[in-house]
Image (tube, helix red, strand yellow):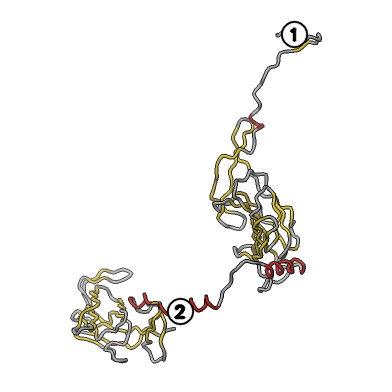
Amino acid sequence: MDSPESTPGGLPVRPLKLRQAPLGWVFGHWLAWHGPNTDGIGRLTYTTTRFCVAQRKLSSCSMPVIVETPAQGEAFGPGMFIRASTQSVLPVGHHWDALLFQPGTQDTLIDAISFVEGQSVEMIAGVRQVHPGQREPIFSPQLAQPATGGEYELHVRVISAQSTILDTSGPIGVVWKPDPWGTAYVQSLAATSTVQGGFTETDRTTINASLTAVTSALPLTTSLPGVANVGLEQLQKGPPVDFLSEGENLLLTGRSSITRASGGTGVYAYGGRWSIESAPPGLGKLDGQAVLYEQRIAQFLVIKNRLGGGQYASDLVDSHYDNGEITWPVPFPVRIDFDILPGVTVRWRWLLFLGQ
């Protein structure tokens, strides 16, 4: 045992021994991000992972956003205050936001944003705060709003400069009950805002001109009058097959050609659909969801005219199945040549564009 030493005044003093501070005193050390997770409304989020050293063990710590205003069950609406804070050490460039959702949906009814950095925030529903003292409206009270008394969930978040969610609150249940004074405040911001935006008549003219430049009229191939406007790229494929319906049908056997003359062309249709009407017994086939025959059942050639004269086959189909279809873009063919396996009868149905 060490003997005490004496000070000049004669008071005994023991030697000072330094001991290592317990590791359990170290909390809140930020190490890494952790995610993804989902928050209380099913949205994909990223939450922080902090590691506490306690009892000489690593353990995960949670630093949620604490919402002071509004409280659970309180009325909420445009112009009302949202006050929240977090104990997290926040990086430079973060901002706060608050989103109001109807439970079970991800449709935002109203939000609030503050770019003023800090571990606490005071936001106003329907307002964006860019700098201290500078606020802009982000909500239009003039638009249709849900009925008063609806129940909603408020979520307050801290967002990094890389749009990562740093911290978030749990859902705060509030009741949609706009306050006349709060609504009037947001309206006053909209009336005095210097932010430029909105859909102008010039925008409308530009969009209509662009639409005209990239659309073309496809003629309907039924008795209905008129045309249907489609994108220019659709001219390379014809109308979507979902828009085609079956018209007249023919029974095909042997080798020949078919037409559907109308509108100055040999084939006034956008395609054809076929199926076996009858076949001789013993015809080799492999059963399945679609019956596959060993021999070619039908062959179809789509014949079109060349601009400089002559004709060419734009499409060739060799079918070993019991049914099928073919479509073509404009210009319309002049005829469809076919060859059916001897002993087989095929029913052909024209595909017509109804424009509906």
CA distance for labels 2 and 1:
98 Å
Q: Quadrant of the C terminus?
A: bottom left
Task: From the viewer's perspective, tell me whether residue 65 is left or right of residue 165.
Answer: right
Task: From the viewer's perspective, tell me whether residue 29 is left or right of residue 210.
Answer: right
Q: Nearer the viewer, residue 68 or 341?
A: 68
The percent position of residue 113, horizontal first and vertical second, equals 64, 58
The percent position of residue 32, horizontal first and vertical second, equals 55, 42
Q: Nearer the viewer, residue 192 or 289?
A: 192
Q: Residue at x 73, y 68 (%)?
A: 183
Q: Residues within 10 Å of mark 1 (few under 14, many from 20)?
A: few
The percent position of residue 223, horizontal first and vertical second, equals 39, 92
The percent position of residue 31, horizontal first and vertical second, equals 56, 39
Residue beneath disc 2: 209
Secondary structure under tag 2 reads: helix
Secondary structure under tag 1 reads: strand
The correct choice, above or below, for 73 with respect to 30 in the image is: below
Residue 177 tag number: none
Q: Residues within 10 Å of mark 2 (few under 14, many from 20)?
A: few
Residue beneath disc 1: 5
Amino acid type at circle 1 is Glu
Q: Residue furthest front?
A: 194
Q: Nearer the viewer, residue 253 or 262?
A: 262
Q: Are marks 2 and 1 in contact (CB under 8 Å)?
A: no
Rendering quarter of residue 114: bottom right
Q: Quadrant of the N terminus?
A: top right
Amino acid type at circle 2 is Ala
Q: Earlier in the sequence, mark 2 or mark 1?
A: 1
Task: From the viewer's perspective, tell me whether residue 123 is left or right of residue 329.
Answer: right
Q: Residue at x 28, y 75 (%)?
A: 322
